[in-house]
Amino acid sequence: MKIGVFGGSFNPIHNMHLEIAESLLRKKYVDKIIFVPTGDHYSYKTHMISGKSRLEMIKLAIKEAPNLSVSNFELKEKMIYTYETLNHFKNIYPTDQIYFICGTDNLNYSNTWKHPEEIQKFPILVIERNNEKINSKFLNQKNITCIPIKTSALSSSLIREKIENGEEITGLVPKKVQEYIQEKKLYRKD
């Protein structure tokens, strides 16, 4: 089986995340995708809500999707790095192929990754994000595949901004996620 590990802050998860996952499954790049929300220890991330809330929103978003799952592996008391996450899933699924799913923005800053050589042992599926092109130094690497998925400018930061400004987010996130955000009063200024 081909298992994709889709990491990110998912702050909050939105419809473009789900479209990317469904497209990867539909086009048979992977057979299953595991969403892995990052821990709460990333100081460069602003407006990050608790990992518990982000995990719950992912669960709500993928509830009806049999080939999508979520893991709380990175939601620990200490910082967990991507290479540790990928090795963790390789240990759980030793006979399966583990793929790392990331955006071009993430790959283009791979020089900042902890132990990038460990990550690059895994096949990497790269999604072009916000029209950012993959750095040419990665184009001919056999373990890196650029995925032609039509993405939009939809982002978690845009959704947070809309909520802060009292704007509507219907159609940008799954209905259950929108209800959760409203019920818990997430991302509001007050």
Image (cartoon, grey):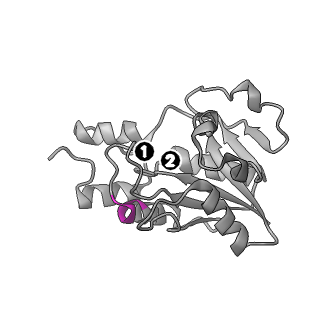
Q: Residue at left 47%, top 36%? A: 154
Q: Nearer the viewer, residue 126 or 117?
A: 117
> Could you tell me which secondary element the residue under label 1 belongs to?
loop
Please tell me whether mark 2 or mark 1 is closer to you in this view.
Answer: 2
**Image point (27%, 38%), residue name:** 167
Q: Do labels 2 and 1 touch, CB within 8 Å?
A: yes
From the viewer's perspective, is 118 left or right of 50? right
Residue 188: give x, y in percent of width and height.
22, 47
Left or right of 58 in this view: 40: left
Q: Which residue is mark 1?
A: 171
Amino acid carrying label 2: it is: Asn
> Which of the numbered marks, if any, corresponds to residue 154?
none
| Real-space Cα separation, disc 2 to disc 1, in angstroms | 8 Å
Nearest to the observer: residue 34 or residue 90: 90
Pick the residue in front: 90 or 148: 90
State the extent of the magenta-drawn residues as a range. Answer: 50-54
Where is residue 64 shown, x and y percent of the image?
55, 67
Rendered position, 150 above or below 69: above
The residue that mark 2 highlights is 15
